[in-house]
Amino acid sequence: MMLGHTTRSLFHVREYAMSSIINAVHTAVSGLNSQSHAFTDLSNNIANSQTTGYKASTTSFEDYVTNNELTNNGQALSDSVVATTRQHNDNQGMVTTSTNSTALAISGNGFFNVVQATGQSNNSTPILGSQQYYTRNGDFSQDKNGYLVNTSGYYLEGYNVNSSTGTLGTSLSPIQVPSTVAFQPTESTKLTMTGQVGSSATSTGGSATTSATAYDSKGNAQTVSLDWTQVDATTWTVSNPNNPTNTATVKFDASSGAIASVNGQSQSTGSAASFEYEGSPQNMTVSLGTIGYTNGVSITTDGSTPSGVTTVSDSVTSGTFSGISMQTDGSVMATFDNGYSQLVAKIPLTTFADPNGLSPQNGQAYTATSQSGSPQVNAVNTNGAGTLTTGSIEESTSDLTGDLSKLIVAQQAYGANTKVVSTADQLLQTTLAMIQ
């Protein structure tokens, strides 16, 4: 009887011990899996320590509490651990200068709006997909088709200027600036007149009309006319036929034919003679010449036939495309060989309520999720969106020194868990041999 009772006790001890040891094995295995997870996160951070716009992640550990036959008095046992990757997309990387003049770096909140190519057409132009992506990799450059593409192959989106109307679009589309982009004539601010309007030999009744092509702020051309009417032998009026009140009285010198005064104002020799044109397409200064000189508008004094008056605007009307430049407000400018640059697109930034809730994709890109919240498209430095630095990139947020230290800790923890497994195996063998 005593032997049977002892045997039953030993069986009970063995079952309890085996349950505890197996539980320890499960815990150690979960530890191995968790440390492997941490090792993966750390190796990813280390591998991307030089990746533009990369956001380093961290590993969080949490224990699982289970109730089983080993529980006493309602106490729970922690017998496993789970590792999860935590994103830190809101961490700011260091902004450094780049040799790429079209590179952009974001400081603060926000992402670039980008799309991917899904294929190519027969003429080798990319077919761009409709899936919206977001990225902090602003290392953009132009491809052969004039699109702005970053080093991960994502195409930058923005608001493009309509080449026909000159107005900025209101919907996002890939930014393309082809080498064939046309120069838009600059806005006219000044009209310059030269030539002879009449003769001092004629006392009254003379008249002449001159016209010029002027351009508005959108590069649209419009004809502007000015009428000259003789008052006496040396006095004429110049007027805007569309605005009778917009007029000036010009007095000429009888001996030289040069302008003596405008609107009766006494001016020194060599000062500018002009009046202000008021009307369409915009108000402009009309240069009549120089007081005391015949380099502008004049009259003949010898009775000869006047040559007539020519009027030209100060608009620059031609230029050859030479490249693009980026501005800190998100403007993409086309530059031309005449020294001028013109707006072709505007880059906005998109913000999220929780950027750490975005879904990571290949090439430092993300897609929106229910956790991240809806995308909010804003102008640069507006409504919480960050600022841009041109000719710069945002470096990876990986902490190489810190990650290497954590890697050693993960290695030691992994080794410790393998030790638990091997020790548990020995204990199981000993326990199974207890009553043999």
Image: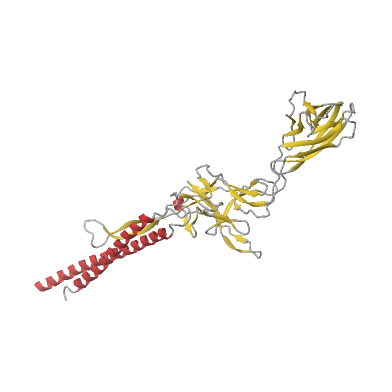
Which corner quadrant holds the C terminus?
A: bottom left
| Residue visible at 61% across and 64% down in the picture | 120
- What is the quadrant of residue 233 in the picture? top right
Nearer-the-camera pick, 292 or 206: 292
Q: How many marks?
A: 0
Percent x, y for residue 352? 49, 48
Percent x, y for residue 377? 54, 47
Which residue sits furthest bottom? 436
Horizontal side of 100 relative to 270 (left or right) equals left
The answer to whether any part of residue 1 appears in the image is no
Percent x, y for residue 71? 23, 59
- What is the quadrant of residue 21 in the picture? bottom left
Residue 312 lies, with reference to residue 347, above or below; the image says above
Which corner quadrant holds the N terminus?
A: bottom left
| Residue visible at 21% across and 58% down in the picture | 72
Nearer-the-camera pick, 55 or 128: 55
The answer to whether any part of residue 324 appears in the image is yes
Nearer-the-camera pick, 205 or 165: 205
Horizontal side of 140 relative to 34 (left or right) equals right
- What is the quadrant of residue 308 in the picture? top right
Check the image and tell me how it is coloured: secondary structure
Horizontal side of 411 relative to 114 (left or right) equals left
Percent x, y for residue 50? 45, 57
Residue 268 lies, with reference to residue 334, above or below; the image says above
Nearer-the-camera pick, 12 or 153: 153
